[in-house]
């Protein structure tokens, strides 16, 4: 059995940032486990620019952003194993992993889970039709285009206007494909406004809001799709279908945190985020196991993934050094306008201001965001617009929390 | 005449309005100077940074970008030129692959290739 102080599962942006911050806060004996043949995670295939504006004040491409962190990991001589998949982990922090050398068992004092997310697939959507070739998730099409050098199709329709779908609309157009339509079931796009401008409008690609794909045609290969208008309940309105001949359909319909490892370990999960339930230091319900990045909550920007993961790295060092093991717990509640709030629990023994992240369920205007306990409002702020596409936050000073006894509730009210 | 733009400089995506009054260009709605510069360029000569990939002799793809924005109307010309290129590794991130590639921009590697 190999022994490490800290094992980090996943060598993407979250894993890399947490490794560096754990090292710099005093944990030198670290192993990163990565299932692919390179560090960097999904950033490797995100060759477009726009990463790092918050953190580095410049616009980097995905591989460039990843390299900033890989360089730091190399400089600190932090160990990593590539082409290695973790099969299981236990509450006592023993990891079973497999690679070309066979099965390895690793015992850790602390573990950080940074396994990222996977794309929601066609199967989750119930679209009528057979199963021809030519149906891809946007991320798969991105991997084919940017890593393997293959174009997935020539006449493309994209369902979902999340950022990956928008980025792929531009990418495939530049590579010579015609992107005929982007259909979005919601009345607004969940993607960034700048991506609507630079990925769709720049190339005259039409965006159909309140529309979905109602049928996919084709036996061996996709030959056409039907897109239909939907009503306010997202049900297809009869006789609104337009048929678009095409050979390829991309799905860009959201990300789901990848947490099979945690599920199997019996770590407490949140049905709202589909990630682990965590304290403000990103510790899960099992002492010494932490989670950060997109496996915990889906972030809009990698800059925030790095920030959250640095927190997890420092927390892991604290745990290894026997800090904060005693917990004085306050639960975090939310009102009906919020999709989730994270962290879900507060450990009052950990000093420091607490930043609550949340997403709203619908688009709200003239918003009042409040943190209250037992009917007493401890903190509030106003925001002109909140949309589900944007993660929001509210920071609560520690002195407001130190004396709480009851649940703390985060609420959003719209006028 | 009034025209509105969505700024692409950062994730904020400000809606910026440009109005020509006599000989003056009035710009409003931007949060920062980058937004103003963006709209000025959009009104005269729109430019974009191009990110794409080039072939390597070993069969892999290497991500690349133009180190400055090139004319938007030249994006497809640039793609055509890049499709004819093929490089040998090793290449270091930041290496200039084609000097003065287009519109005064160099084509540079955005990843390492071993």
Image: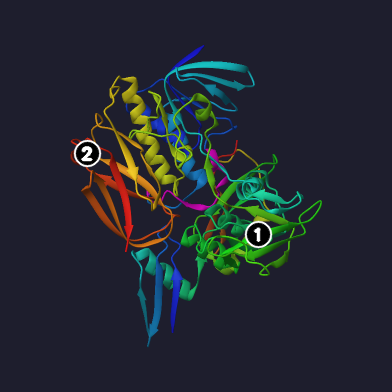
Place of residue A49 in the rendered image (x, y in percent of width and height, measured from the top left): 50, 53
| Residue drawn at 58 percent across, 30 percent down | A35
In what quadrant of the picture does the C terminus of chain A appear? bottom left
Quadrant assignment, res B50: bottom right
Chain where mark 1 sits: A
Q: Residue furthest bottom?
A: B22
Q: Is residue A130 left or right of residue A322?
A: right
Q: Are marks 2 and 1 in contact (CB under 8 Å)?
A: no
Q: Earlier in the sequence, mark 2 or mark 1?
A: 1
Where are the magenta residues, as a range? A41-56
Label 1 packing within 10 angstroms: few (<14), some (14-19), many (20+):
many
Which numbered tag is attached to residue A213?
Answer: 1
What chain is tagged by disc 2? A
Q: CA distance from mark 2 to mark 1?
A: 48 Å
Where residue A366 appears, as percent x and y from the top left, is 32, 63
Residue tagged 2: A401
């Amino acid at each position: 059995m190999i022994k490490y102080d800290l094992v980090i599962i996943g060598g993407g942006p979250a894993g890399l940032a947490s490794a560096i911050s754990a090292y710099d806060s005093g944990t030198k004996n670290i192993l990163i486990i990565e299932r692919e043949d390179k560090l960097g995670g999904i950033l490797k295939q995100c060759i477009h620019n726009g990463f790092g504006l918050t953190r580095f004040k410049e616009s980097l491409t995905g591989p460039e952003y990843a390299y900033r962190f890989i360089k730091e990991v190399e400089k600190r001589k932090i160990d990593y194993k590539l082409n290695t998949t973790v099969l299981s982990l236990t509450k006592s922090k023993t990891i079973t992993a497999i690679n070309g050398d066979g099965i390895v068992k690793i015992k850790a004092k602390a573990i950080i889970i940074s396994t990222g997310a996977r794309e929601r697939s066609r199967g989750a959507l119930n679209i009528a039709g057979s199963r021809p070739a030519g149906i891809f998730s946007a991320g798969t099409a991105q991997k084919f285009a940017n890593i393997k050098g293959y174009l997935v199709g020539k006449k493309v329709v994209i369902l979902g206007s999340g950022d990956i779908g928008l980025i792929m609309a531009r990418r495939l157009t530049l590579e010579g494909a015609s992107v005929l339509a982007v259909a979005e079931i919601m009345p607004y796009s969940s993607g960034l406004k700048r991506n609507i401008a630079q990925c769709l409008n720049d190339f005259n690609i039409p965006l159909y809001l309140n529309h979905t794909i109602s049928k996919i045609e084709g036996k061996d290969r996709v030959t056409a799709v039907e897109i239909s208008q939907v009503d306010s309940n997202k049900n297809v309105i009869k006789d609104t279908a337009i048929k678009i001949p095409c050979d390829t359909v991309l799905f860009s319909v959201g990300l789901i945190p990848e947490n099979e490892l945690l599920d199997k370990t019996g770590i407490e999960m949140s049905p709202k985020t589909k990630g682990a339930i965590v304290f403000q230091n990103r510790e899960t319900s099992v002492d010494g196991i932490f989670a950060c990045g997109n496996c915990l909550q889906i972030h809009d920007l990698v800059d925030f993934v790095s920030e959250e993961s640095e927190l997890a790295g420092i927390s892991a060092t604290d745990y290894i050094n026997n800090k904060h093991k005693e917990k004085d717990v306050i639960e975090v509640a939310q009102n009906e306008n919020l999709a989730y709030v994270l962290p879900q629990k507060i450990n009052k023994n950990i000093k420091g201001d607490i930043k609550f992240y949340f997403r709203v369920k619908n688009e709200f205007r003239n918003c009042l965001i409040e943190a209250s306990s037992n009917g007493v409002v401890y903190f509030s702020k106003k925001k002109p617009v909140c949309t589900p596409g944007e993660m929001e936050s509210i920071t609560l000073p520690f002195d407001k929390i130190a004396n709480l006894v009851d649940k703390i509730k985060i609420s959003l009210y719209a006028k | 005449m009034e025209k509105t733009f969505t700024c692409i400089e950062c994730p904020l995506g400000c809606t910026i309005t440009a109005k020509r009054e006599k000989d003056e260009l009035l710009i409003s709605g931007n949060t920062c100077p980058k937004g103003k510069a963006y709209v000025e360029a959009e009104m005269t000569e729109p430019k974009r940074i191009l990110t794409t990939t080039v072939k390597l002799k070993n069969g892999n793809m290497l991500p690349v970008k133009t180190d400055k924005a090139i004319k938007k109307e030249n994006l497809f010309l640039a793609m055509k030129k890049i499709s004819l290129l093929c490089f040998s590794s090793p290449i270091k991130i930041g290496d200039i692959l084609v000097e003065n590639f287009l519109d005064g921009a160099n084509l540079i590697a955005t990843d390492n290739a071993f």
